[in-house]
Image (tube, coloured by chain):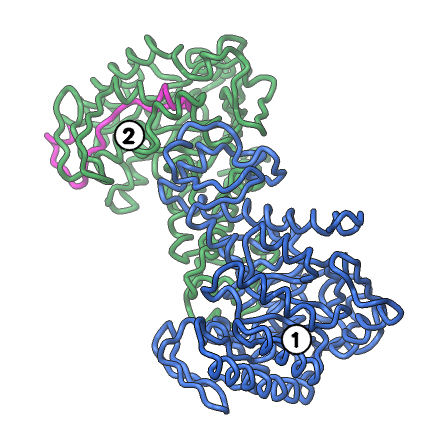
Chain colours: A blue, B green
C-alpha cells in the first residue's frame, strides 16, 4: 500500500478515482462521496472548459472550492474527449481544432492551452496533453502519434513549469479554500509537483524498485504547494513503441506516469499485455496511473500488477443503466425476476443501499424510470469499487498479495 | 400544535407531507427524508396501482416495507389522478373507467376497488374515493358531483370497515415490518381507525372547538392497529355545497376530514375563501387535511387557519425546474446572474445544501442538466417547507400564532 501526498489530501494507493465529469459524480452529493470513502475524484477538462468554463472556476478559487470537494482531484488533459467526442477534429503539430459536442462551436486545444485550463481548474494532479491513438492503427500511425505525444509532453511540462504558480489556490496563500466543509490534513499543505517526485523517490531511495503489491510510503516535504503534472505514455498496441514512449516521457521527467490509449476497443487480453509490458518501463518509485480501466476484476488485477491509480466511468455509467456489481456477480436490476425479491442487492455489501433497500424496490425504481434508481444504483456501484480497492490495499498491507 | 398517532409514527401537526408518487420522493433516498425531518409522506394510489402494482406491494408487507420507510404514509384514493391524467375517463355511479397514461390499457376504479388497493398498500392513512370536480363547473354539475362523492364516501367506509383487517402488516401480527431501519414509537402500535377518532375526540371532550393555532393533543389508545380512512369534502367553489358536503361526510363518520377539489385552476383568493368557510363546518377535534396546497406562504396561512395536514408537489416539482424557495424569496437558479455567486442559496437555511454549496455551483449543475441539480434542489426545497411548518408548530406552541 502506498500513499500520495496531494495538496488536498493524502491518498492511500492503489486508489480508484470516481469520474465527476462536469464537477459532479452524476447524481451523488459530495457528502455521500466522502461517506463512501472516495479519496480522489476525476474531473474532465474538456467538459469543464465548455461548461461552466475555466474562468468561472478559476475566479471561484478552483474546482475544489467551486464544487465544495475538500479531498483530492485529478483533471485529465481534455485530449481523450477531443478525440472520442469529435469526429470533425483537425490535428496539427500545434494542437487540435475541434467542435463542441454541445453547440458545434469551434475551439482549439494545444499543450499550452490545456495546461492553462488545468492550472485554472487547480486540481491536485493534472495531465499532460496527449494524442489518444485510435484503435486499430497501423505501425506508422502509432509511431507518429506516439512521437507527437512526446513532443506535446515536453511543451506541457514547459508551460506548466512557467505557470504553475498561477494555480487559483496558490494565489490566496497557504490557506487554500476548499469549501465550507474543507479539511486538510496537516501534511497536505506541504506538497509540490517537484517535491512530489522527490518524496516518492526519497522514500524509496534505498529500496529496490517496487515490486507489485509492495508498499510505497511517502514522507511529506515542506515546500510550496502547487499542482503535480503527470506524463502520459502512448504507443498504441505496440510494445516497442510503448517502451520508447515510456523512456521519452521519463526523460522529460514527471512526478507520476500514466498509461493512456487503452480500453479504446481492443481485446481485454491485449490491454493486459500492453499494461504489463509498459509497467516494466515505468519507475516503481513514482505513481503509475492506468487511465480509463476497468471492471472490478480488472482493477484488482492491475492493482496487483503495480498500478497505483485507476479511473473508469463503468461503475457510475453502468449504474445508470441498471447494471450492478456485487460480490456474487453482476445483476441487471431491470429484470422481472427481481420484481418480488426481498433480498438486498448484495448480501455482503455494507453500503447503505444494501443495508436498507430490497432488489424488488430497486427494480421498481428502475422500471418506473425514477431518478432515485440512478442515485441508489450509483451509490452501490461506487461503494463496491471503493471497497474492492480497499480490500486490495488491505491485502497488500498484509503481504498477502500475489 | 397537535399530534396524530399513526401505526408507524406520532405526527406533530400541522404537518407538511412530501409527495412520493411511485414509492419515492423523486431523487431523494429515504434516509435523507428522515434527516430532513419528514414525518409522513404521500403515495399516489393511481401510480402505485399501475407500477409496481398493488399485489406486489401487498405481498411484500405493504408500502412501508416495500420502500423501507418506517415513518407514516398517507395514500390518496386515486381519484385525483384518474381525473387529472385521463381525458377519456368514463364516470358512472359505479365508478370510473380510465386508461393508463403509461400504455393506454383500460382500468376501473370504484370506491370498493380503491379501498381494496389502499388496504393492500397499507398506508397509515387512506382516503375515500371521491370525484374531484373540475373548475369551472356550473351549479348543477357541482351539486351532482358533490352528491356522488358523498355516496362514494359511504361505500368507501363500508368496504373499509369490512376489509380493514386485510392490511398486510396486520396479517403479520403486531410486529409490523417496516424495513431494516424500522422504528416504531411505543405508542404507535396501539392506534386504530376508530380509536383514532375516539382519541382525537377524547382529548378534546372537555374543550371548546379548536380555534386556529390551538394545540390538539391525542392520548394513545390501546387497541388493534389498523389504517385510518379519511373522508373528503367536495362541492366545487360553492360555499353552500361545501357546507352540505361537510355535513354529509361527517354524518358518515370518519376519523379525519380532507378538503379536496381545490388548487384546480381557481384564483388563489377563491381557494382561501372556500378553505376558510369549509373549515368552519369540520370538527375541530379531528384532523383536517387540505389536499394539494400550496406555496410556502399558503401553507403558513392555512396552518394558522386550523388546517392540520397539507401535501403539495410544488417543492419537489419546482426544484426539478430550478425554482427554489428561500427566506429571501424565490430564486430561479438557472439565471445567469448566479453564475459566479458564491453565496449559499439561502443564508438563513440550515440544510446541507445551503451549508455546503454555492449558488454558482447549483446554477452550473442546473445549466449542465446534471442529475445532482435535481437532487440538491429538492433537498433544499423540502427542507424549506418542512422547516417552515416546524416554525409554525413552534409558534403555535408558544401561543404566538394569530
Subunit under mark 2? B
Q: Position of residue A217 (x, y in %)?
A: 82, 62
Above or below for A363 versus B223: below
Query: Is residue B233 in sight in this rendering?
Result: yes
Viewer-proximal residue among B268 and B9: B9
Q: Position of residue B285 (x, y in %)?
A: 44, 20
Query: Could you confirm whether marks 2 and 1 are on the same chain?
Result: no
Q: Which mark is residue B78?
A: 2
Highlighted range, magenta: B118-143
Query: Is residue B359 in sight in this rendering?
Result: no
Q: Position of residue A166 (x, y in %)?
A: 66, 83
Viewer-proximal residue among B178 and A160: A160
Q: How many marks?
A: 2
Above or below for B52 versus A278: above
Q: Which mark is residue A230?
A: 1
Above or below for B330 versus B198: below
* Side of B353 relative to B148 (left or right): right
* Side of B31 relative to A193 (left or right): left
Badge 1 element? strand
Residue at figure coordinates x 57%, y 56% from the top left: B354
Viewer-proximal residue among B101 and B164: B101
Q: Quadrant of residue B244?
A: top left
Residue at figure coordinates x 45%, y 28% from the top left: A341
Subunit under mark 1? A
* Side of A82 relative to A248 (left or right): left
The residues bearing labels 2 and 1 have C-alpha atoms spaced at a distance of 59 Å
Residue B136 belongs to the span the image colors magenta: yes
Badge 1 local density, few (<14 within 10 Å), some, or many (20+)?
A: many
Tag nearer the camera, 2 or 1 = 1
Residue B244 belongs to the span the image colors magenta: no
Badge 2 element? loop
Amino acid at each position: 500500500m502506498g500513499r500520495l501526498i496531494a495538496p488536498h489530501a493524502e491518498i492511500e494507493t492503489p486508489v480508484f478515482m470516481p469520474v465527476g465529469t462536469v464537477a459532479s459524480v452524476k447524481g451523488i452529493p459530495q457528502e455521500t462521496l466522502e461517506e463512501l470513502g472516495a479519496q480522489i475524484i476525476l474531473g474532465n477538462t474538456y467538459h469543464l472548459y465548455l461548461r461552466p468554463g475555466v474562468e468561472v472556476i478559476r475566479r471561484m478559487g478552483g474546482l475544489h472550492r467551486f464544487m465544495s470537494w475538500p479531498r483530492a482531484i485529478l483533471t485529465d488533459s481534455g485530449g481523450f474527449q477531443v478525440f472520442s467526442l469529435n469526429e470533425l477534429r483537425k490535428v496539427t503539430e500545434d494542437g487540435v481544432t475541434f467542435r463542441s459536442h454541445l453547440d458545434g462551436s469551434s475551439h482549439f486545444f494545444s499543450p499550452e492551452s490545456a495546461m492553462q485550463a488545468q492550472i485554472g481548474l487547480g486540481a491536485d494532479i493534472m495531465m499532460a496533453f496527449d494524442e489518444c491513438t485510435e484503435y486499430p492503427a497501423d505501425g506508422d500511425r502509432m509511431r507518429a502519434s506516439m512521437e507527437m505525444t512526446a513532443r506535446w509532453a515536453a511543451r506541457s511540462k514547459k508551460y506548466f513549469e512557467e505557470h504553475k504558480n498561477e494555480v487559483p489556490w496558490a494565489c490566496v496563500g497557504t490557506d487554500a479554500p476548499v469549501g465550507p466543509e474543507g479539511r486538510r490534513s496537516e501534511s497536505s499543505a506541504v506538497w509540490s509537483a517537484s517535491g512530489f517526485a522527490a518524496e516518492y523517490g526519497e522514500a524509496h531511495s534505498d529500496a529496490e524498485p517496487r515490486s507489485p503489491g509492495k508498499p510505497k510510503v511517502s514522507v511529506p516535504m515542506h515546500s510550496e504547494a502547487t499542482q503535480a503534472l503527470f506524463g502520459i505514455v502512448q504507443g498504441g498496441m505496440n510494445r516497442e513503441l510503448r517502451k520508447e514512449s515510456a523512456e521519452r516521457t521519463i526523460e522529460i521527467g514527471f512526478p507520476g506516469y500514466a498509461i493512456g490509449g487503452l480500453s479504446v476497443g481492443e481485446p481485454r487480453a491485449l490491454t493486459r499485455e500492453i499494461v504489463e509490458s509498459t509497467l516494466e518501463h515505468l519507475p516503481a518509485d513514482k505513481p503509475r496511473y492506468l487511465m480509463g480501466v476497468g471492471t472490478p476484476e480488472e482493477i484488482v488485477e492491475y492493482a496487483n500488477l503495480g498500478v497505483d491509480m485507476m479511473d473508469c466511468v463503468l461503475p457510475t455509467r453502468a449504474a445508470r443503466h441498471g447494471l450492478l456489481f456485487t460480490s456474487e456477480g453482476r445483476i441487471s436490476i431491470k429484470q422481472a425476476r427481481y420484481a418480488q425479491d426481498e433480498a438486498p442487492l448484495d448480501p455482503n455489501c455494507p453500503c447503505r443501499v444494501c443495508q436498507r433497500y430490497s432488489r424488488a424496490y430497486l427494480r421498481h425504481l428502475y422500471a418506473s424510470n425514477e431518478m432515485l434508481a440512478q442515485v441508489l444504483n450509483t451509490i452501490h456501484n461506487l461503494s463496491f469499487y471503493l471497497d474492492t480497492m480497499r480490500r486490495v490495499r488491505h491485502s497488500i498491507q498484509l503481504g498477502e498479495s500475489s
